[in-house]
Image: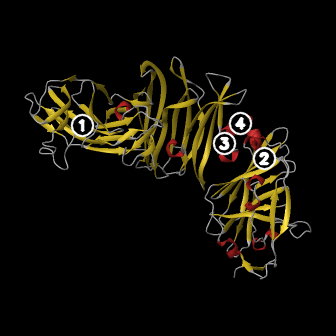
Amino acid sequence: MAHKIKIKNYYTAIAFLILSCGQSSKKEKEANGETQGAVEINETVIDSLTNVEYFDFNKTIKSLPTKTLPHFEKSNFDSFVEAEDYKVIDTQALQLDQIYPDYHREGFNPKVTAMYRLPLSDRYISLAITILKSEVEMETLLVNYDANGKVIAHEKVAYDEIAEGMSQVVSRISEGNITVNRIFWGDFKQVEEVTFEILNDGKIEKIDTKSLNEIFEDFTLINDVLLNSKLDWIHAKTKLITTKVFPESPGETIVVIPEIVDEGVMYFTLNTHIVIADNNTERIKYNYFESHETNGWVSDAVRLDGIEIESNPYKIAEDKEAFGVKVSHFGSSRVNPYSIENLSLFVKSENKLLKVLSNYSIADYGGEWDGDCDGEFNETKKSLMLSQEKTNGYFDIEVTKEMTYTAQFKDKNDECLVNEKNDTKNATLKFNGWRYGEYDAETNVYSEFHPKKLDNIQIDRFHIEQAFEVNGYKIVAGNFEPVNGQNVAPDTENDWGDRLLMLDSTNNIVYKSQGVGDVYRYDPHFYEVDGSDKIIIICQLAFEYPFGGEAFILENGILMYMGRLDIEGYYEEDDGKYMVDIIEIKEVNNAIEFTFKTEQLLLGPGTEDEVITNNNARYVYKNKELSLLSNNP
């Protein structure tokens, strides 16, 4: 039976007036424009209720809002500026007398000002309760109740006081754990991070306490970087924060802040914040941000184990020095061991950092075995060395891959034997004008070329917009002219407008593509590989805006339609670039890949208009099919 409590026939409501402002010692409050000074609280009595009402625990919580996880709890006096921000909430059903030992002491009259639910478990009920303890103290408790409203456990997750203005508590509440920051302002800021585990039965246990001031040598610098990035320590995965003096400039420090987006039991995802800050002014001079959706900073069954700033710089140009950030993942499965280490490179550009190499695997290990002997394992380690050759203004990076294959098996005497094979391969990282990509001896890169234009070609009833001579054939773009304003054969209702034709030496049409309707632009662009007879033709499409293009392949005198590249670069402002300005074409492992040199892309331009971050988005043509692949979710 639910716990029921009889309520007295009157309630007390609270009205707050901000009467004076004084100076606060909290630097962050000044930076965030929060209220300074003392707040005087006046209590008024609401008209007495004429009817006695009965409330139980379930009725009290029934209409409460539910927050999503992870929840960052930072309730303080500035959260309740106006009198109407304060609510009259039944406190007796919450059993606060079980939480506060001196609840019935004369003069102690805590008042609940806000309350909401947290979806921590279906085994118990979790409430975050903000309580005004006095005119100068406010705190928020996380309280776990059983189904009948009995308190299982509680923990303070937020605190604010305006008498001295010297202390505060904030927290991050996630499935299975609570991270609490206890902050004190004295001669300098101090942050104590306390971690709690929420057990399956709703009990709360402290598992770790550490002083962030002592852990981080660059605490003050990191603190200012967080503030300038509009973050608090509670938003960061502190064990993965890392700093290093910038190799090119000892007066600057690289700071990597992993911002928590989602967090659960043995799981988290992080946004990337990388900045270069001035050591003296602590001002951010260069910054880089990447969303958790594309950066690969995810920890689940394969644990994100570490983030490290490389000590050695990469001088990728005479006037450009890049620094590396390595991210390590580790799989804890005993029978399926796995680990990988990815490297990204960043360079300064105006007031930003540009990512010129993205999540390039420099070491990986994996395999499968029976836990006793039988199994197979593969390991690859890569070493990088700058070349003297340049591509698009940046030095190439030579890659040596050392690969080891290991097989374990038992012989007839039940002894475990090991067979190991080693191999070495070379590859090159080349800069494509946007980022470095890997090319090996089997990779063919297509370059744009400009074939001879033809001016004196005539085709009956066909309006020629552009014509070119390619390998003894004529490639013509245009449209069949209507007759008396009507489309007639070879145009049809579903097949009319601009298209591509191929003519033989006698000007006979040997190929005719499907019409695309009446477009403003249908411009052929040509790409080839030295020593190959394959030619890729992309016809850029546009109205008053570009909307992708059609791809064709000419090989051994046969022209074939590859498919539609329904994509464009996305820019905040019109910079005049078309898809053909950002495309890169390469062939590897019997597949042709179309990739794009820009940070953001527009899928379905003119129709869907879906903006995505370019996380290796690419069209792949294989087995006569063109498919769009992307690492975006």
Find the distance from the CA under tag 1 to the CA under tag 2: 63 Å
- Disc 4 packing (10 Å; few <14; some 14–19; many ≥20): some
Q: The N terminus appears in which quarter of the rendering?
A: bottom right
Find the distance from the CA under tag 3 to the CA under tag 4: 10 Å
Q: In this view, does 536 lie above or below 132?
A: above
Name the residue type under label 1.
Answer: Phe
SS of the residue at dot 1? strand
Sequence-first disc among 1 and 2: 2
Sequence-first disc among 4 and 2: 2
Q: Name the residue under label 1.
A: 552
Q: Mark 2 points at which residue?
A: 183
Sequence-first disc among 1 and 3: 3
Give yes or no for contact between labels 3 and 2 (Cβ–Cβ under 8 Å): no
- Disc 1 packing (10 Å; few <14; some 14–19; many ≥20): many
Could you say which is closer to the camera, residue 251 or residue 33? 33
Name the residue type under label 3.
Answer: Lys
Could you say which is closer to the camera, residue 32 or residue 380? 32
SS of the residue at dot 4? helix
On the image, the x and y values in percent for residue 96 come to 79, 69
Q: Mark 3 points at which residue?
A: 230
Q: Is residue 468 above or below residue 159?
A: above
Name the residue type under label 4.
Answer: Asp
Find the distance from the CA under tag 1 to the CA under tag 3: 49 Å
SS of the residue at dot 3? loop
On the image, the x and y values in percent for residue 188 come to 82, 38
Q: Residue furthest right?
A: 106
Could you say which is closer to the camera, residue 495 or residue 366? 495
SS of the residue at dot 2? strand
Sequence-first disc among 1 and 4: 4
On the image, the x and y values in percent for residue 74 come to 72, 53
Q: Name the residue under label 4.
A: 224
